[in-house]
Image (cartoon, rainbow, N blue to C red):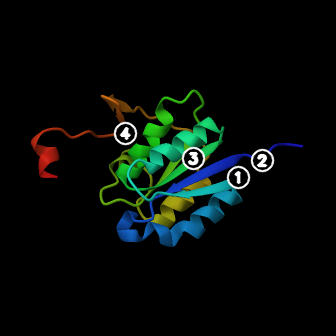
């Protein structure tokens, strides 16, 4: 008898002008249709996604899916970055800019991005950066540009 693989969805319900939460059931159905035993975690404050992702790695989850904007994605990556065990990681972009999703070719429309998670069958490695004790994917902004933003 084989052990069912486990997935954790980390959802920021306020992402996408609070649209992300409207897709919760659809995302869950898609991940479960891939044969995963699913755990759903919703963020309530800063760094929740980091804690949830770290928990998923420490407990040996096979797959982590972050649902939110670039901040949620960066937090989840931070939670996974220094873990000995690295689960498969994916994302459904719901932010304003979605820089990382754009960079790796994830569709930006919610339905298409969720379908992309369903159909994805290859692994793509991505570099991450670290400044002091914070990890990031794709972009870091410093100085006047960051201040203006």
CB under 8 Å between callouts 3 and 1? Answer: no
- Relative vertical location of residue 125 with respect to residue 73 in this rendering, above or below: above
As drawn, the residue found furthest toward the left would be 144
Classify mark 2: residues with Cα within 10 Å, few (<14), some (14-19) or many (20+): few
Identify whether 91 is placed above or below 137. Answer: below
Question: Residue shown at 39%/44% (left/top)?
Answer: 74
Q: Say whether residue 93 is visible.
A: yes
Mark 1 or mark 3, which is nearer the start of the sequence?
1
Please name the residue that numbered disc 4 is placed on.
Answer: 137
Residue depicted at 17% across the width and 52% down the height = 149
Residue at the image point whose x is 45% and y is 66% from the top: 20
Mark 2–mark 4 contact, CB under 8 Å? no
Q: CA distance from mark 3 to mark 1?
A: 11 Å
Q: Secondary structure at mark 4?
A: loop
> For mark 1, what is the residue?
36
Disc 3 marks which residue? 64
Residue sitting at the far front: 45
Task: Kindly identify which residue carries mark 2.
Answer: 4
Tell me the distance, in whole angstroms, between the alpha carbons under discs 2 and 3.
Answer: 15 Å
Mark 1 and mark 2 residues within 8 Å of each other at the beta carbon:
yes
Disc nearer the start of the sequence (2/3)? 2
């Amino acid at each position: 008898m084989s052990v069912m693989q486990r997935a954790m969805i980390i959802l920021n319900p306020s992402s996408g002008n609070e649209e992300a939460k409207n897709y919760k059931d659809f995302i869950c159905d898609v991940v479960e249709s891939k044969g995963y035993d699913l755990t759903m975690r919703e963020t309530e404050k800063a760094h929740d996604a980091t804690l949830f992702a770290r928990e998923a790695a420490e407990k040996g989850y096979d797959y982590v899916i972050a649902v939110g904007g670039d901040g949620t994605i960066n937090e989840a990556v931070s939670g996974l970055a220094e873990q000995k065990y690295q689960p498969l990681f994916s994302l459904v972009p719901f932010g304003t800019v979605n820089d990382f999703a754009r960079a790796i070719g994830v569709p930006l429309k919610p339905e298409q991005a969720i379908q992309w998670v369903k159909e994805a069958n290859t692994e793509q490695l991505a570099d991450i950066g670290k400044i002091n004790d914070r990890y990031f994917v794709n972009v870091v902004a410093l100085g006047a540009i960051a201040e203006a933003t």
